[in-house]
Amino acid sequence: MARFIIQRLMLLPLLMVIFSIMIFAIVQAPPGDFLTSYAATLASSGSSVSMEQLDALRQQYGLDQPIPVQYYRWMVSLLHGDLGLSLEYQRPNIELIGEQLWLTLALAVFSFILTWLIAIPAGIYSATHQRSVLDYVLTVFNYVGVATPNFMLALVLMWVAFSYFDLSVTGLFSAEMAGQPWSWAKFVDLLKHVWLPATVLAIAGTARLTRVMRANLLDELNKPYVMTARAKGMSEWRVVLRYPARLAFNPLVSTIGWYLPQLFSGSLIVATVMNLPNIGPLLLRALVNQDMYLAGAILLIYCFLTIVGTLLSDILLAVLDPRIRMGQ
Amino acid sequence: MSSPHPTPLEPIVETESLVEERISVASNWTLVWWRFRKHHLAMASAAILIALYAIVLCPDFFSTQDPEFTEARQAFIPVQGVNFIDEGRLDPWVPAIVGKRNPVTLRMEWRTDPSQKIRVGFFVAGTEYKVLGLFKSNLHLIGARDQSQRIFLLGSDRLGRDQWSRIMHGTQTSMTIGLVAVTLSVILGIVLGGISGYFGGWIDQFIQRLIELLQSVPTIPVWLALSAALPRDWTPIQVFFAITIILSLIGWTTLGREVRGHFLALREEDFVLAAELAGCSRARIIMRHMVPTFLSHIIATSSLAIPAMIINETSLSFLGLGIRPPAISWGVLLQEAQNIQTLALAPWLLIPGLLVIVAVLAFNLVGDGLRDASDPYSK
């Protein structure tokens, strides 16, 4: 087990290097650089910069160097734990990303918990009460849930809240709390706001998970050992929860690996629509303004989270399912 | 054993054997079709998809007017309901809309005026357009009989453009993008997965590692970055193809894996060995003997992949990084609904989203039906 984890951990730096090359190639791909789009912004607002000033700035940021040199410099500073300077905000990227990263993770974890809390009982109910009214309702809900784009759901909920309850449900904090340092009150404020975006994010996942749980459990319920348990006089509740539910649960764990990363990336769109302090909108803005080091740093973080998510689920699966033996 | 009721049993036995005979001589595709036909939901969904692709072929025919025609004075006109009966006769009409500027908010407020009726007709003459870029026509499925009148079946947007016509054109882009992107993924998946599974060895290892790498890419952020990298001065057609390629770059991996699995399993089968001994070329073995055995399965899987592509395109365009105006797609249309104040004023701007849901649902149901139908072991 330990060997397996170490092997996987050793692969991590290699993957990160490949991803960093890919990401660097993508973020510097658009024609022009930050300064050309910066100059264009200035020009559209009426002021202007001289060519000399631009060249001086370009030299200062190293944007005049050939691409491999730029990449090398970026890697060196990354290895020193320096994510670089945002060209647009003129602040260290790590500061910009900092708190928003935690909120991104909090949102993902929150909706993840919500997904499982709803999906597992719903799946078990659907399987044990096959063809009941609620089973059909859940099935319809699942199909529609999968078919609805995240941002669409966010829009509809925001619209309903705005026009029928006169509520503004954007952001993760109320106006007076946003600038405050962390405190219990701020945490409670976060909980008051986080449920809506978390629900929006959780719906598609819940729909998918309920379907899988139902199908898995239906497979298990027909097996002879369930009949044996019933024949021995176990209560129906205990029969279902004790054995088949646990077996049906296992394959789901293996999907955490891609589900968690999906939540990180999925929250990007919802966060943009709902104006949440999340690294998603920050990435979007950085991409549009060609703030390449900020965009690169955020993309790298997404990749890192994805790899770690996959690793975590592999380990979890190995722990849960003794049939998976490593390295043999 | 002699049956106590020989007469009523006879005909049943006969039809059963007839049915059996039909089944045993039916081709695989006929069997799939028979099984698919039994899924009523899937059949209904297939009908919806056919209707949507009819719109894709010629959106202008279904539009009531030019989707780009702007008239700022007719902004945010609400949905006009069509009345089919007038004075006891079948004579479709929509009530005219009269606007008055609210003196306090300075906003136009629209009111329907049922006393003024705009006659609506089917197969009416309207703006001229080209069918598939080939021949000219000015026939429209539905429209105002009086060509000088505009009707807004699904309301108008902030520039006074007719949403109904824009949705028809958006359908063309969005439905095509899903299909093209999935076709590309299928080609990539079959070729690379096939190579991987058939040849094995180092090339298999390489492709497998590539798939693993691509699957651990966080899709949405990378898609965004790639689309942001597209030059701003590209034409809508170039952007369209670039977006489809971006979407299929990651989409092929799942399919590639599946194809590889099929090839690995089939390589050991007797009929492949027989074909090899008979002296078939490799290409012939693959295309003639191996691929047809899992083609129906691949089709089912890819029809389940189209809705994901549609949702992705819509999301990218909604964020302003996919299809860009003046091209119209469902995502571009939904961009109009981005502002919550606008949405409160004009909720009908969400209708394109409804269409996304319907299309995705239909694809999912058809895909499920096809998957069940293509499985030879299903009952």
Image (spheres, coloured by chain):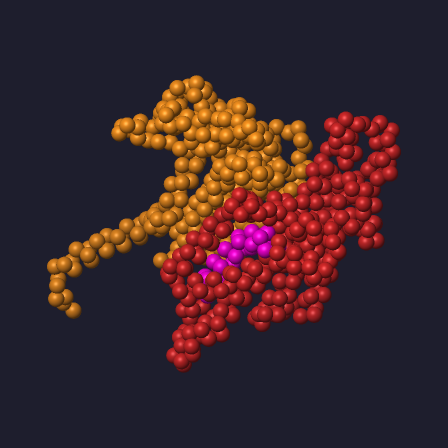
Chain colours: A red, B orange
Q: Nearer the viewer, residue B151 or B205?
A: B151
Q: Which residues are magenta?
A: A194-218
Quadrant where the N terminus of chain B lies? bottom left
Q: How many marks?
A: 0
Picture quarter containing residue A287? top right
Specify the farthest residue to the front: B104
Q: Residue at x 51, y 36 (%)?
A: B346
Query: Is B240 colored magenta in this rendering?
Result: no
Magenta: main secondary structure = helix
Query: Is A205 colored magenta in this rendering?
Result: yes
Residue A66 position in % (x across, y down): 82, 38
Q: Nearer the viewer, residue B20 or B84?
A: B84
Q: Residue at x 45, y 61 (%)?
A: A215
Q: Nearer the viewer, residue A166 or B284?
A: A166
Q: Say if residue B96 shows up in the picture.
A: yes
Quadrant where the C terminus of chain B lies? bottom left
- Residue A33 vs residue A269: left or right? right
Q: As displayed, is residue A214 above or below residue B188?
A: below
Residue A37 position in % (x across, y down): 75, 33
Q: Say if residue B311 shows up in the picture.
A: no
Residue B162 position in % (x across, y down): 49, 28
- Residue B342 vs residue A27: left or right? left
Q: Residue at x 67, y 47 (%)?
A: A280
Q: Nearer the viewer, residue B246 or A273?
A: A273
Specify the farthest residue to the bottom: A232
Q: Residue at x 48, y 72 (%)?
A: A241
Residue A326 position in % (x across, y down): 63, 68
